[in-house]
Image: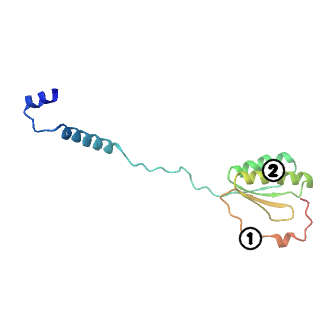
C-alpha cells in the first residue's frame, strides 16, 4: 500500500515491483563480480638439488640421523660392514619401516650396502646376479 502511494506521488505508476527488484539483483550481482580477483598461487618451492648421503654406522643410535635424512627427502646409501650382523639386521628393519612410511624404496646394492630412497626417487636396474655368491649376514 505504501508503495502504491509513493508511485502515485512521483507519477511512476507504470513501474512494477518485480522490475525494481530485478534491477537491484542485477546491480548486486555485478558488484560482487567486480570484487573477485584471480590470484596466482605459487607452491613456494624452489627447485633444490637432489642429495644422496653416505653412512657407515657403527652403533644402533646412528639410525636416527639416517632416518631423518630420509624424512627430509634425501636418498641414503648405508654401508653396514663396520657393524655386528645382528645390530645391522635391526638397523635394516628400522630403515625398512622408515622407507615404508614415506612410500620410498630400499634396495641392496652390495654385500652389506643398501640404497634407501624417498618417494621422489626412482631406482632402476637390479644387482642380484652380483649378490648371489656372497654369504648374507642379514
Look at 75% across and 51% down and name the residue there: 98
Q: Position of residue 133 (x, y in %)?
A: 90, 71
Between residues 20 and 134, which one lies in front from this camera angle?
20
Give the mark, 2 or 1, whose residue is nearer the N terminus: 2
Look at 74% across and 70% down and name the residue there: 125
Look at 9% across and 35% down and name the residue there: 13
| 77 up-or-down from 59: above or below | below
Between residues 116 and 3, which one lies in front from this camera angle?
3
Mark seen at residue 35: none
- Which quadrant: the C terminus? bottom right
Q: Residues within 10 Å of mark 1 (few under 14, many from 20)?
A: few
Judged from the image, the secondary structure of the residue bearing numbered disc 1 is loop
CA gap, disc 2 to disc 1?
24 Å
Mark seen at residue 125: 1
Q: Position of residue 10 (x, y in %)?
A: 8, 31
Q: Position of residue 86 (x, y in %)?
A: 92, 53
Answer with the quarter of the image where residue 92 lies: bottom right
Between residues 3 and 137, which one lies in front from this camera angle?
3
Q: Position of residue 87 (x, y in %)?
A: 89, 51
| 18 up-or-down from 106: above or below | above
Judged from the image, the secondary structure of the residue bearing numbered disc 2 is helix
Name the colour scheme. Answer: rainbow
Q: Which residue is mark 2?
A: 94
Left/right of residue 67 with respect to residue 121 in the rendered view: right
Amino acid at each position: 500500500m505504501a508503495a502504491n502511494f509513493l508511485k502515485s506521488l512521483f507519477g511512476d505508476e507504470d513501474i512494477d515491483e518485480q522490475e525494481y527488484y530485478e534491477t537491484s539483483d542485477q546491480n548486486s550481482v555485478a558488484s560482487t563480480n567486480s570484487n573477485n580477483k584471480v590470484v596466482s598461487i605459487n607452491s613456494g618451492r624452489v627447485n633444490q638439488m637432489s642429495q644422496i648421503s653416505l653412512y657407515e654406522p657403527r652403533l644402533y643410535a646412528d639410525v636416527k640421523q639416517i632416518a631423518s635424512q630420509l624424512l627430509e627427502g634425501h636418498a641414503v646409501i648405508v654401508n653396514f660392514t663396520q657393524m655386528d650382523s645382528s645390530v645391522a639386521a635391526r638397523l635394516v628393519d628400522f630403515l625398512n619401516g622408515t622407507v615404508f612410511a614415506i612410500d620410498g624404496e630400499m634396495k641392496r646394492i652390495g654385500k652389506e650396502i643398501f640404497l634407501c630412497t624417498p618417494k621422489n626417487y626412482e631406482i632402476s636396474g637390479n644387482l642380484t646376479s652380483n649378490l648371489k655368491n656372497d654369504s648374507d649376514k642379514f
